[in-house]
Amino acid sequence: MSAINIGVIGCGYWGPNLLRNFAENEDAQLRWICDTDADRLASMARRYPMATVTTDYCELVNDVALDAVAVVTPVATHYAIGRDLLRGGKHVLLEKPLTANTHEAEELIELAEANKLALMVDHTFVYTGAVRKMKEIVSSGELGDILYFDSVRINLGLFQRDINVLLDLAPHDLSIMDYLIERQPEGLSAIGSCHIEPGIENIAYLIMKFPGDFIAHFHFNWLAPVKIRHTLIAGSRKMILYDDIEPTEKVRVYDKGVTTNRVHDREADYQTLVSYRTGDVWAPKLDTTEALRYVVTEFLDAIRLRRAPLTDGHAGLRVVRLLQAAQESLRNGGKFTLISASAQTAPAV
Amino acid sequence: MSAINIGVIGCGYWGPNLLRNFAENEDAQLRWICDTDADRLASMARRYPMATVTTDYCELVNDVALDAVAVVTPVATHYAIGRDLLRGGKHVLLEKPLTANTHEAEELIELAEANKLALMVDHTFVYTGAVRKMKEIVSSGELGDILYFDSVRINLGLFQRDINVLLDLAPHDLSIMDYLIERQPEGLSAIGSCHIEPGIENIAYLIMKFPGDFIAHFHFNWLAPVKIRHTLIAGSRKMILYDDIEPTEKVRVYDKGVTTNRVHDREADYQTLVSYRTGDVWAPKLDTTEALRYVVTEFLDAIRLRRAPLTDGHAGLRVVRLLQAAQESLRNGGKFTLISASAQTAPAV
Amino acid sequence: MSAINIGVIGCGYWGPNLLRNFAENEDAQLRWICDTDADRLASMARRYPMATVTTDYCELVNDVALDAVAVVTPVATHYAIGRDLLRGGKHVLLEKPLTANTHEAEELIELAEANKLALMVDHTFVYTGAVRKMKEIVSSGELGDILYFDSVRINLGLFQRDINVLLDLAPHDLSIMDYLIERQPEGLSAIGSCHIEPGIENIAYLIMKFPGDFIAHFHFNWLAPVKIRHTLIAGSRKMILYDDIEPTEKVRVYDKGVTTNRVHDREADYQTLVSYRTGDVWAPKLDTTEALRYVVTEFLDAIRLRRAPLTDGHAGLRVVRLLQAAQESLRNGGKFTLISASAQTAPAV
Amino acid sequence: MSAINIGVIGCGYWGPNLLRNFAENEDAQLRWICDTDADRLASMARRYPMATVTTDYCELVNDVALDAVAVVTPVATHYAIGRDLLRGGKHVLLEKPLTANTHEAEELIELAEANKLALMVDHTFVYTGAVRKMKEIVSSGELGDILYFDSVRINLGLFQRDINVLLDLAPHDLSIMDYLIERQPEGLSAIGSCHIEPGIENIAYLIMKFPGDFIAHFHFNWLAPVKIRHTLIAGSRKMILYDDIEPTEKVRVYDKGVTTNRVHDREADYQTLVSYRTGDVWAPKLDTTEALRYVVTEFLDAIRLRRAPLTDGHAGLRVVRLLQAAQESLRNGGKFTLISASAQTAPAV
């Protein structure tokens, strides 16, 4: 089969990484590079002489020989560009978060389905060796019942002028949780504070309630003295600590837990006997391939095999739905915010 | 001056530590040991032959030669025993938390003040070398404006049958924050989950809102695969990481922060320029003396010098107030719970 | 069977730990406590009223009802006391190192064998959960060929006035290596320096050459700013890192190594292809029982079952032989010092 | 002043980094790129179109407009290329180690001095923020008397076919010690073992004796399960731990040490009282500029200002002298090998 013709819109911080991965992939042919900044465009043109450059993404929409486009622009522009590309018959890979709100996401999903085009969101972390290994472990059932998901992503980080710390960092952890846990919360509450710039939270806590006793919590912080990227996934039989700072042993599986037995007891009729269990710790070897390489491969495979990509529009929508509710709660001082019932059905993944 | 005659009620887990520290203190004379368990009492009698033992604490109330009593019994009994002792003219040191609710605490405070007796709560952590060094640093002002307090106390911990993880662990961190930050929140929200025993939360998150942009957050957890005891205290100029697991370098002061300047800008009229600052890290030497030794000394000094102890009844009340509100919020699924206005006045410390 | 009557000579730093473990063991009856210091003796007498105390160890030698004695005195006295006890028909447990030189050790071994008495050395580390687990792993063969043993034991440690850092710390690591590796070196070299007190090395490096390409190296240091207790045991298939500072995950097994293939190559006739292999890391659960409890049990079992204890006189002799050669090399500025051929035969363990 | 015309010989692993740093330096003009591999040369030509490429370094020797050359070729070729360049009147920067033996190094030094040309060795680590900060601390005298230097550089590293682990890794640590300590040893001993390829040591220990009680020790290892890069520099007043794996706090200064007092004592006439001292720990902020940028600047400055570079030929010779002695000792099974007396004079730095 001939190579898939690819265009990339947006050459800021992340775009060049996608460009490089498309350029290195044998199944792709880099055909267009688009950016509004002429200098950046010139620099990319030198590096990828096989591609045509433009400042107008409509040229990509109108090029009948172009198959698919990766959009790496600010989130506010995702919907309009994505819509035009899908209407133009192009498969679309959108940077995360998929869109600025759920309505936009739903419309793109409909457009893609109506036109039988691939719509994919770049939830990069889902394609890392660490997250894929955790998926394998969670899917195998060896953790037992999943009890909670606790994530801390803090650092003296890059302050963003246009979005707060939640919109900046939460897409990472929400997409990881969505992939690993496959459950949708009933509601959530988000609280933060603005210490640097009025109106832009630099610290935020997000807590989610789910049907049953599963619970999820997130700490996002741009103003911490140390860099911590910890995720705890506790099961009734085993627990995972995912430490993304660790150079190699990022995932540790602890054979630890609590055993409870309800026994008849002379004094108290029935009583729960609780005993702690501590066993081995295991750090599985992880695939160290760059995650974006798998993102690109997944996008190309989905196009070629006419199947939904792993992180399809629905995955993107689920994350956008949580972000939107979290922002609403944040604006309302932490008010508990319901997630629409339809969202709580099992994900399509 | 002659030694202060001391009685200790309760010889379970913590009581023997107080007994030992009173026995080793030259200003104290151990006179009574009281417990309802005869075996424990016999064992303590062998170790401290100078003291008289009893299963009835009223003997202590009625002993006119007895000056002061440390009460190390379950929290439900603190009020009644404390009240009887204060009415009997004894100075009282109560184990934390001070009482089961704020009304009880207020009554004990009134009783103590009316009878000019010392009422102290054993907020042990306040007397550790690490917390005292942090107090020194915070008081010096070198952190700049205090921005947030973030605490994580998790472990595969001892499951308590009668109280949840919040009542078990929060007194530590709330007393530390009360001492270091000296601010009272407007309200709080607590959410948790019960994975081991119905009705007994083994994981809980507590978030507090304060006047201004200061914010505090706590994670308490009995069911974590790793032991973490981290507290971040961020200031506008410097930040502290307090890691109680570290054997010696428990307190690290990071000369890190963000500098913001509002400048006139041609494009946007006024704009905030944000720049990150990273400097040295400093781990001060800490006093490694057992904290309980200072607790005992503070109690004896307060009695002798007729002054309020550092962790007096008001400090105990402030912590009880937060615990009570947190429990209420927990019972109401995380509902934001106001702290009474009177509580938000500056602490008496 | 009736309990074995036990005497303990020496109640300094380590003696009380042995006393406690004998007192708690159902198969032992504590009968004598001996020390030259009357105060210590009085303190032990209060704690163990069932035992008779004395300042003269000859009383123990002459008590026909006494079965066995643990000797926890300075190493210079081990030989004379051990000899008298063995001649008196007592089983003997000697603190490490067994004796001050190999001649003394050999004489004690002969005496014990001639009198059919147990002679054991308290190589405590051999009985820890970590070392026993490593023995299990090494014995299973899963490491492949053992390539090297590298040990670092450094700290700002207690300066000893009478012995240097090598005599103080090497018995630990040499007894661990002796137990795990079961090989004797052909020779060794030790170099150190005296920064605190002339003539007393506070830092020393010890390197050993073995038949074949196995190599062992040790770093002992009382004057280091950080506490490190690392041992690497590298095999051709897997490697162990034993970190005794870690609270729980003291032993990590790395599925890492190098694969070499000698292949025919057009350019160089034959060439070795080297490829690195990195797999999972595994931290086995360790028995956390106090090691001395197993020491005491092993001593009592050896007596009762009339078998050699795990760390018998020969194990003690092997360690003494290495210490003696290391001291000789140290005195000669690091001169390579041969170990007598007889020592290189397989250990009797 | 006009830019200095630069040529670079060798575009393998390290060469491109030097190329990039010369290209980015305003005081340099990249004029020649030389390599024997045509593909590499073509790739560099595309990246640096301002330079002329060649496979024959004689073209550089003969170009009268060329000022200076960086030589990044295998060590066996350093002498011949360096000699030709110096004879051709070029300033020379040689990759470390300077040459394969001391005779070659001495000859190049003579040639450079006779022709008044700069001869510099790329001891990169000397130019890192961490090492420069340590130099500042050592030079200030705050460590007190320097007692020992202990370095561990181990990893599951890249096996080199042509040189052993000592020649591969020791240049780093020897150049660091040479720069920080400024002392030359009387002699050294090196012992290693070959587990992968006969004749190529993959583990080696190197110990050095100095006049006085200062001592230095090194552990080099390609076959370790973990990556450790630790250097301890102990002083009588303070100690440094340099951990190059740490992302930011690479240098820690411990206010720890031992205080000794010789006092008159009734029992023992004179006795040394030893007391340990533990104070604060301090991790200074480090300059994170790429070290090679400073290497290039130092080379250009030395040329322009007609002064010796910081790591001049003599510094290179001192490291080569130690490497040569270490190799000799290694070949002789660890035999103590003297360093020639002339070498022990203070370095010219």
Image (spheres, coloured by chain):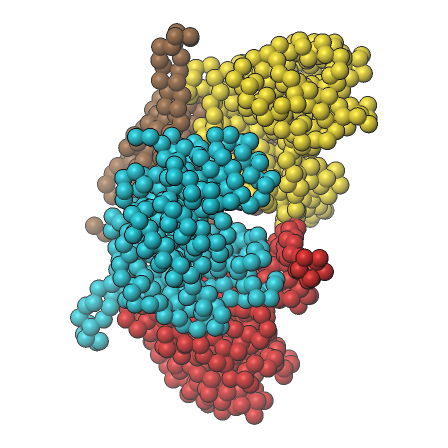
Chain colours: A red, B cyan, C yellow, D brown
Figure disc tally = 0
Q: Nearer the viewer, residue D147 or D329?
A: D147
When asked about the image quadrant of residue D252, the answer is top left
Residue B27 appears left or right of B229: left
Residue B206 appears left or right of B260: right
When asked about the image quadrant of residue C313, the answer is top right
Q: Is residue B187 above or below residue D301?
A: below
Residue B93 point in image, percent of width and height: 40, 46
Residue A278 point in image, percent of width and height: 64, 51
Quadrant of image for the C terminus of chain D: top left
For residue C54, say whether it is visible. Answer: yes
Residue C43 appears left or right of A46: right
Q: Is residue B303 above or below residue D27?
A: above
Residue depicted at x 66% and y 68%? A139
Residue depicted at x 35% and y 22%? D345
Residue A68 appears left or right of C294: left
Residue depicted at x 31% and y 49%? B115
Residue A150 point in image, percent of width and height: 51, 64
Q: Nearer the viewer, residue D29 or B250?
A: B250
For residue A172, say whether it is visible. Answer: no
Q: Nearer the viewer, residue A73 or C322?
A: C322
Residue D31 point in image, percent of width and height: 35, 53
Residue depicted at x 56% and y 63%? B200
When asked about the image quadrant of residue C251, the answer is top right
Q: Nearer the viewer, residue B168 or A253?
A: B168
